[in-house]
Amino acid sequence: MEPQLFTECHYSRFSSGGRTNIYGLALFETSMESGLPVDSEFPSNIIRSFPQNISHKLQNQNKSKAIRHLFVSSFYGITCFASATGYWNTVELPLNQDIGEIISMDTFSSDQSNLVFALTTVHTEGDGQHNFTLRIYSLDDASQMYIEEAIFRIAEQCQVIRIPFTPMQLFHTRININGESNTCLLLCGNDGGVHLYLRNKSTNKWEEEHVRSYFPFLASLSESSILSLEIREIGDLKIVAAGCQNGRLHVSIMKFDTSVGDFVPMDEPACVVLFSPITSISVFSSSSSKVSPGDIHMLVTCAVERAIIYCNVDKLVLNRPVYLKECSQYDSVLCSNIMDVDWDGNNEILVGTYGRELLVYKQDIDHHNVLTFKLIWQRSFSHPIYQIANLDLNQDGIEELIVATQHGIHILQPNLEKAKLELLKVLEDLKSLKNELKELKE
Amino acid sequence: MKSICLVDKLTWTFPGNMNPHAFAFGDVDDDEDNEFVIGNLNGELSVFKGNPIDGRPVMTVIGLGTITCVAVGDIKNSGKNSIVCVNAEGECNIFDMTKHNYISTIEEENIPSSTRRISEAQAPLIKPYVNDYFRLTFTVPVNCNHILIADIDGDGMNEIILARTDRILDVYSFETSLPADGSTVNKTPSKDQQNLLTRSGNLITEITANITSKDKLNVNDTSPTLKQKKKWFFGGQITSLSTAIDPHTSSPLLLVGQPGGHFTIIDKNENQTCPTQMSNDLQCPDESTEVSTEVAKGVKWNNGKNSDVIALVTMDGNFTFFDLQTSTMSRHELQVTHKIFGVASIDFVRDETEISSKERSDDMFVACTWNGNTYIIDLDFNVVKFEFEGRVCAFAAGKYAVTPGCNIPCFIYVDFEDHITVYHNLCIDTKPVRNFVELMNDQVDQKQYYDVFTDIVKEDIVKDYDIEKQLFSTDPCQYSPYIAGIFQQCLYKLDSYKITKEDLEKKIKELKRMKQEQIEETEREESNEEPKELIVENEIMLENEIMLETQHQENDVSEENQEVETNQEHNDENTISATSDIGGT
């Protein structure tokens, strides 16, 4: 077992009894940056009202730089962790109090909007009847805004869509409409379907469209309830997977067809029954490189069994499962995440359990030259783990690990001393290459 | 302020309400592992040892009155710790435990009738009654609420210091008289101490042990007494007791907490100083007089040497550090919503033997409020907060042996639901959120790496890198995100790093190949004109020339020419031109 891979640098507890769930976390990639200076109480300061001291735009800004911010929902509110250089700002999103309890959340930017914020909520009437709604907040022409400003602006107006089913995961993905790439919103429901929403370009309203037109595979599923959805594009492949309440896992592998100009299924969709509700699906590549991603695997977690990695899912589909044994000792596995924890350019697998344990697995090759996954680190938390994510929250070049437990967000930093040594090694390496080149040129 | 979550915990059961100071950490059974001793207002005193599976104490004594304070220490100066438990009724009970004790008490089934009633009410709670054999009872003043066991007069003997709610501080020593030779004191006080005793005008009383009926001690041999050594009166309520070491004389100091963030230092010669009141009128208490003050001592390390720092914490959140070495004070206000009541110092070194004194970190101070907010504060006033869920009746921070052989720092919370929660495996870093760019800044000779960055940056991340570079070198704190971007690229071996590296390697390979070709080409060219070997040959010729010159004086010229010519016959055609040169000279 390796020494401490990560140490907690801050724990942000949801205010007044808030709790999150497995659909309560979203990473938002944008060019909008933080406009507030570091607070003296950082990192425990919370911005609850429109910030008056927002600074003016600096010169020489590279607007194309992508920044990632973190959004987390608790039952009655949304907390945003806006990343800044050397710190972050915690903003509590001012939402109308009578929206009810938040079930799931997603946030993204599209061609029309700089910030789209989707929520599903449940409001319990006096007679005990549940009313479910999808709320979509969109903010257009905000490219010049700071993220804190945008958060307060976006809360001002929202589009409410009543939904006749219990909503599950909210998901966004890019789809091709008449040769044009568009962002659509997908919502899983207990009616067994996946619902697709698109923004009408003339009315600027979000409207439900037939999912069949874009994802015939998802439309063909006739399930009781779809709990988790994964759509991932790696290279010229697109993998669509859906996990159900009854343990069924469906997967469809598509390949980009230049003659059609879109992804087409390579084969018939595959299905396997896992006998317990599927809590999360992550399709990932063995390498963190986008240029040469390496092998493509699919990690599936479910409520009762061990987590499963379907190796080379693009070629072998569901035929080569590898089980992550240890995680079954810690109750249901609720969530997973893929990141490079040891800076070797390869992705590691992180799973979080209801039994409050975080486990990190590393890809390995056994003596039969078969791909295995080795447990390299684990850490206990005080409450069940619902979501795991990673982003560079303080923009220092190191990815923080985000663990959302029942009552709050844990921000963990990797071993920075170790990172320093590793980086120095890399820089030394580059330097000697450069020197060698210089000498050769002379 | 950073906030953290503690994970590893034990849950114990302990009933009833208690005085927030009626607990102590200490090795009560002489096995070098620290136990936790706690007493409640119903007269129950429990000892927790290790990690009990059932969460119950290893021993419980009942019927000890309204327990107000508990201490563990070597009061008998015998090298063995005793538990001292004082109640509001003026009774001081002293228990001596050994590992054998626990076993004997567990085996004892004959529970006295007086305790049976309570044991029924708390049936699952009470472990066997402690054998009176190990118990001594003395009479002390009523309403004592703080206790301390320490050597405060520097005579090498521990005293028992008791603070009363009526602002009086009493100092006792445990004496074992030997009636056989008529001596009342079996340990001769030092000369220093004798002087003190005579100078002190206070009434010295002796309390003879009220040996309980079951006691099997031979009364004829020894009759232990608590002898009063000192008695002091204070202007304000005594809110806390602690000790420290005078850094100048290395002698002990007694610290007495006074209301309003003040404290009194009493040195071994009974000189009293009030460092916090120097600016104010010493006799006139100010408006914040009512605010209770906790005093704790922490250790500060400087180049392998340690000195004591005193923390004064008022219940409304005012923190004052008093450095005994420099006699300087620093203040900090902590924003608290509830009153602070439990303050302790703790060092987070798990294994003291592993760390040399040079690497030792300073002690930290821990303060807890009634609603469970716990603040861990270092000497630079960096604060980390932990929220314990629940109202807190008593808070303790100290070293406890969860597993045998290892006293580790623990936070212990006693709640109002008859539970004790023990947090262990505490990994607490009070330093502000760390920043990788700043960390790299401290280490990296920036200039050395700018060139390295330039390649990566110019190609991928930012065009106006020079401006960024300027910014970075002038004010490293206001670092640019692009530097972080480069770090990220390099550390995570992302694509632009990979491309840069591959590009460099390709260029090197290409250049090497070109150079090699060049060399080969020149070699080929040279082989046609003037090969390398010639240079070497020329040097030999030069040497030969010198030799020839010296020889010239002795031998015939024609002879030498012949010699040279015979040598040349073995060489290839290239050397012929050289020979002709020599021939020319």
Image: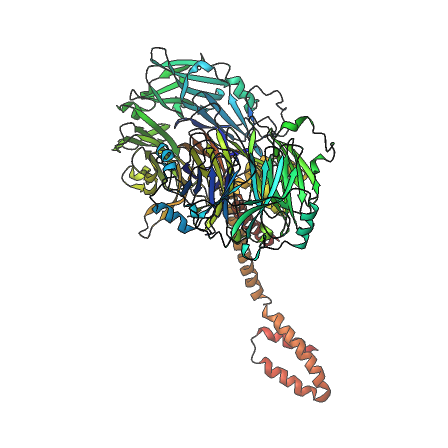
Residue A431 at x, y = what percent? 57, 49
Residue A376 in sight? yes
Q: Residue at x 56, y 31 (%)?
A: B340
Picture quarter with the C terminus of chain B: bottom right
Residue B450 in sight? no
Look at the image and name its color scheme: rainbow
- Above or below — where is B54 with respect to B351? above
Rendered image quadrant of residue B295: top right
Q: Residue at x 61, y 20 (%)?
A: A52
Picture quarter with the N terminus of chain B: top right
Which one is nearer the viewer's eye here, B276 or A264?
A: B276
- Above or below — where is A367 with respect to B261? below
Residue B65 at x, y = what percent? 47, 35
Which one is nearer the viewer's eye here, A34 or B341?
A: B341
Rendered image quadrant of residue B11: top left
Q: Residue at x 36, y 22 (%)?
A: A187
- Above or below — where is B217 with respect to A124? below
Which one is nearer the viewer's eye here, A213 or B61?
A: B61
Residue A153 at x, y = what percent? 53, 17
Q: With B416 as the anchor, is A153 left or right in this view?
A: right
Residue A161 at x, y = what percent? 39, 14
Q: With A318 as the anchor, is A57 left or right in this view?
A: right
